[in-house]
Amino acid sequence: MMYPVLMVAMVTLAACDSKPDSADAPAADTSHMMAAAPMTMAGMGMLPGMRAHLDSVAAMPPTQMAAMMPAHEGLVTRMMDAMGTDMRGKGMQPSPAWTALSDSVRQDLAEMPKLSGKGLTTSLQAHAARMQRMMVMHEGMMRM
């Protein structure tokens, strides 16, 4: 007879001592932590690598340039997408200058695979200059 009473007492004590379930606990207010958290800017993180890539490509002979065009296009596209994400994260709209420059870079990417030799070298040099301007412009916008 003592055994059932002891069991009930132990269960009752255990229930009284337990902490509330997380579902029963009030939700923590983390909005202040989100506001203070630094924004990750993927586009900004890609700039040093893109600069090195452009320097490397500029030193290639035209045959190597032509062979690496698909990889270059992918890298530039990812960087431009990341830059757009950075801008949206800061609530920015693209300026007319940004839009014109990005359109020119996209046009470069469409035209360069059709070129070879000196034409490709010349086009890639102009493209690299546009890319450099775009990166400088992006850095300036992200500092605002």
Image (cartoon, grey):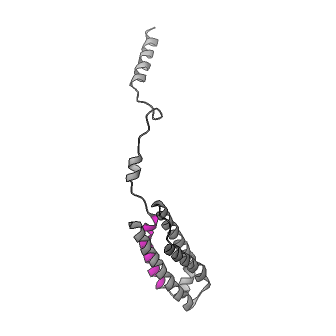
Q: Residue furthest bottom?
A: 118
- In the rendered view of the protein, which quadrant contains the C terminus? bottom left
Nearer to the camera, 66 or 124: 124
Q: Is 142 contained in the magenta span? A: no
Tell me: residue 142, above or below residue 129.
above
Q: Is 48 contained in the magenta span? A: yes
Where residue 139 sits: x, y (%)? Answer: 41, 70
Q: Residue furthest front?
A: 96
- The total of numbered circles placed on residues is 0
Where residue 109 sits: x, y (%)? Answer: 57, 78
Q: Residue at x 53, y 83 (%)?
A: 65
Q: Specify the quadrant of the image occupied by residue 112.
A: bottom right
Q: Residue at x 41, y 66 (%)?
A: 142
The secondary structure that most of the magenta stretch takes on is helix
Q: Residue at x 60, y 82 (%)?
A: 111
Where residue 79 sits: x, y (%)? Answer: 50, 70
Q: Specify the quadrant of the image occupied by residue 110.
A: bottom right
* Magenta stretch, residue numbers: 42-58
Q: Residue at x 41, y 45 (%)?
A: 30
Nearer to the camera, 27 or 16: 27
Asked if residue 119 lies left or right of residue 22, the reply is: right
Q: Residue furthest right?
A: 114
Asked if residue 2 lies left or right of residue 71, the reply is: left
